[in-house]
Amino acid sequence: MKKSLGQHFLRDENISRKIVAALRQRPFTRLLEVGPGGGALTKYLLDLENVDFLAVELDEEKVRHLQINWPVLQGKILQGSILELEKPFSDKFTVIGNFPYNISSQILFKMLDWKEELQTVIGMFQKEVALRVAAKEGSKVYGVLSVLIQAFFRVEYLFEVQESSFTPPPKVKSAVIRLTPSAIPDYRDERSFFLLVRTAFNQRRKTLRNAVRTLFDTETLKDPLFGQRAEQLTITDFARLTWKMIQPPSKEK
């Protein structure tokens, strides 16, 4: 085990089967497993028929373990970090994983980078992160991650997993969520949307008027919506406000 890699290996076969069962509820032909580790999910994924399978694993020792125990994996494991990985397929694909807890938020932002190609993302997260991803406006845990993920994906909070299901047991509970592409909100452009959401939640205790005042003119800031805090706004609210943002002057060629 390597604490530096956030490794907690799933050992509960029932949980592995539940995750794979949830995966099979949506069609796919290309699959990337993130962090296969000891192969708890991998051994079930290899049984799936007519699936182009790849896995990405940072730990060289685990890569050797997987290739020894499942020779069919030769040539199918990409050694390296998911955060530095180029798109593994040229066409649409699905992602699954017992995601390392120490980089789980970064992995979700990586999924945003790949959003145009993703069919489904299903995986295990620290319960706290899973709740943040699935949170709705008005919740104390509703934030940047909630808004940006839900702007592009439907989030399903599937089930929770006890600490005893892992070796070594983590100090926190876990949860499995599923992301599937959804209709994109009507914003002016992605850059404006991301900037507004991040700026708004950067000072979440302030009213929106004070938190994002540099992004709007004085007249626009009189809108009563700016009297609320970021956590009270819906994704549609954020999208609508992008059309009223002050745009920086275009760069001269």
Image (cartoon, rainbow, N blue to C red):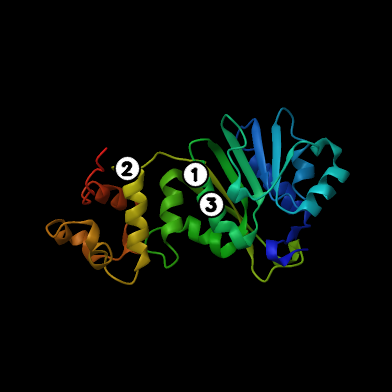
Query: Which corner quadrant holds the C terminus?
Result: top left
Position of residue 172 relative to residue 160, above or below, is below
Residue lying farthest to the left in this orientation: 219
Secondary element at tag 3: helix
Residue lying farthest to the top in this orientation: 50
Q: Is residue 112 left or right of residue 37?
A: left
Q: Residues within 10 Å of mark 1 (few under 14, many from 20)?
A: few
Q: How far from the left and from the top, in percent, is residue 149?
A: 46, 50
Front position among marks 3 and 1: 1
**Of 84 and 253, the residue lying toward us:** 253
Query: Can I make out residue 136 in this image?
Result: yes
Which residue type does callout 1 highlight? Asp
Mark with earlier residue (3, 2): 3
Secondary element at tag 2: loop
* Quarter of the rendering containing residue 167: bottom right
Q: How far from the left and from the top, in percent, is residue 28?
A: 62, 32
Which residue type does callout 3 highlight? Leu
Secondary element at tag 1: helix
Q: Residues within 10 Å of mark 3 (few under 14, many from 20)?
A: some
Q: Which residue is mark 1?
A: 113
Q: How far from the left and from the top, in percent, is residue 85?
A: 61, 44
